[in-house]
Amino acid sequence: MVEDGDRSIIYAELTHGHMIEGSHNCQIWFYRNLHDSAQVLQFGKQRVGYRSLTAGLNEKMYEYGCEAHDNFTHSPANFSWQRRSIKAVNELGGKIRAADVLTEDDYQIYKRLYGVS
């Protein structure tokens, strides 16, 4: 449970990595590996500050050679965060395309902007 504000954190274990996403125009973080001490891997009840799950987590993971592969702020303009997220997942060894994660209407706009991916 995030202690501060009305933000939340979503953690997803990917086939080849990890994603941590903050709500309300926050950053999204992609990791190839997380050290066992990472708070997002502790699934019991806990109350932690937002920063300790985002930038603070990256600082801690850096000490173990597990720093973020990529991180950036959600930006709704021109599918920029979706495009960068797809790129990050694929760089981590995933295999996704824009058509896999966008609605059909959004994918048509995406194709006009960036071509098929």
Image: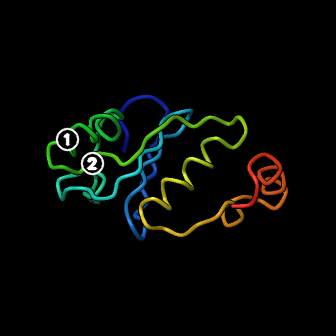
> Residue at the location (73% across, 39% down)?
78
In the rendering, at what x and y percent does residue 87 appear?
54, 54
Quadrant housing residue 53: top left
Q: Residues within 10 Å of mark 1 (few under 14, many from 20)?
A: some
Q: Earlier in the sequence, mark 1 or mark 2?
A: 2
Name the residue type under label 2.
Answer: Gln
100, 46: nearer the viewer: 100
45, 85: nearer the viewer: 85
In the rendering, at what x and y percent does residue 84 appear?
56, 47
Find disc 1 in the rendering and name its residue: 60
Q: Which mark is residue 31?
A: none
Instruction: Locate residue 11 relative to residue 112 in the image: left or right.
Output: left
104, 52: nearer the viewer: 104
> Residue at the location (18% across, 59% down)?
36
> Residue at the location (67% across, 67% down)?
100
In the rendered view, would you say 84 is above or below 86?
A: above
Instruction: Locate residue 109 relative to residue 6 in the image: left or right.
Output: right
Name the residue type under label 1.
Answer: Lys
Which quarter of the rendered picture does the N terminus lie within? top left
In the rendering, at what x and y percent does residue 9 appear?
44, 45
Quadrant housing residue 25: top right
Looking at the image, is mark 1 or mark 2 nearer the viewer? 1
In the rendering, at what x and y percent does residue 106 appear?
79, 53
- Is disc 2 placed on a helix, strand or loop? loop
Q: Name the outermost residue toward the left.
A: 63
- Is disc 1 placed on a helix, strand or loop? helix
Q: Name the outermost residue toward the front.
A: 115
In the rendered view, would you say 9 is above or below 75?
A: below
> Residue at the location (43% across, 67% down)?
93
Find disc 2 in the rendering and name its residue: 46
